Image: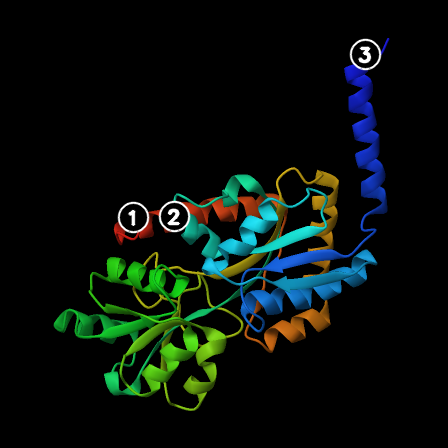
Amino acid sequence: MMTRLAFAALLVCLSSTAQTQTYPSQPIRIISGFPAGTTADISARVVGAKMGEILKGQVVVENRPGAASSIAAASVARADKDGYTLYIGSAANIINAAQNPNLTFDFIKDFTPIALLTSTPTVLAVTPELGVKNVKDLIAAAKAKPDGISFGSSGVASSTHLALELFNSLAGVKIQHIPYTGSPQVITDMLANRIQGYFSPASTVMGHIAAGKLVALGTTDPKRTTILPDLPTMVEAGVPDCVSVLWFGLVAPSGTPQAVIDRLSKAANEALKSEDVAKSLQGSSIARLGGTPEEFRRHIADENTRWTKVVADAGLRK
């Protein structure tokens, strides 16, 4: 004879199954912690729109920038675990956690991975006036003048800052860090030759590189990207382990039904394979990734190990 507890569990299971079978029955929201027009925003909108077609529902993107995306992440961590409120996570979430142990949420424990969506190459760009043509030249110049070369970043402990700290550590150099509030200000000062370099998102500098106003030395991707096939990786340029990927992926609050996670993951991967999504992302210098929830989980764990060490070595932990 079925106990009351077992009967209650059965009812919960049946209710969950029914909800999954009708999912989605209302709009799905993807919350982005970055402003409109950023790689996170473009990725969420382009892939999300196609996912809506595949799921026969509506997917909308909401931007809640602030605190290096932590405000948005915290709100989703507290959202209902029903698959209708998702978050586009990034390397910024790993870095934030490594730097600040007092966040109100735990990115690894409070979120369930759905699919790794996109990445954009990080380009090591310098001014022509610096007079270097490759990474080896830059290392030699930096060793000859410790603190004599300045690189900008989009903020203290940002992805662009930590890419510089990683390079300094691995190359055995000391390039001075100048923090800004965003990429536009960095580029303005580079073009005026007030600073000499920047580990920049590709989309921010490619126009200036094509015009000859800046010089690209390499990318921090693990392998050559289809977006910049002729540019060597930092590893190829002689700096082993200098890998820093600006990645973006969908996650849901932990406790979201696995069937919903699987359905969302399948839709996301199908969307990434579509020709119109590929064309839209390529035009914004964004590469498609994809993969299973478990593969994304392993990626997050690897990133956590990498950036926790970089933050600690750079003395950036609060």
Q: Is residue 260 left or right of residue 289?
A: right
Residue nearest the observer in this picture, 49 or 266: 49
- Residue name at image x 40 percent, y 62 percent: 159
* Sequence-first tag of 1 and 2: 2
Residue 229 visible in rendering: no
The local secondary structure at tag 1 comes to helix
Residue nearest the observer in this picture, 125 or 224: 125
Residue farthest to the bottom? 211
Residue nearest the observer in this picture, 189 or 223: 189
Residue 209 visible in rendering: yes
Task: Say if mark 1 contacts mark 2, CB within 8 Å.
Answer: yes
Q: Is residue 154 left or right of residue 31?
A: left
Specify the amino acid type for callout 3.
Thr
Specify the amino acid type for callout 1.
Ala
Residue denoted by label 3: 3
Counting from the top left corner in percent of width and height, residue 80 is at 68, 43
Residue farthest to the top? 1
Note whether 28 is above or below 180 in the view shown: above
Quarter holding the N terminus is top right
| Label ID, residue 98 | 2
Q: Is residue 19 left or right of residue 217?
A: right
Task: Say if mark 1 contacts mark 3, CB within 8 Å.
Answer: no
Q: CA distance from mark 1 to mark 3?
A: 53 Å
| Label ID, residue 312 | 1
* Sequence-first tag of 1 and 3: 3
Tell me where residue 12 sits by quadrant.
Answer: top right
Q: CA distance from mark 2 to mark 3?
A: 46 Å
Specify the amino acid type for callout 2.
Ala
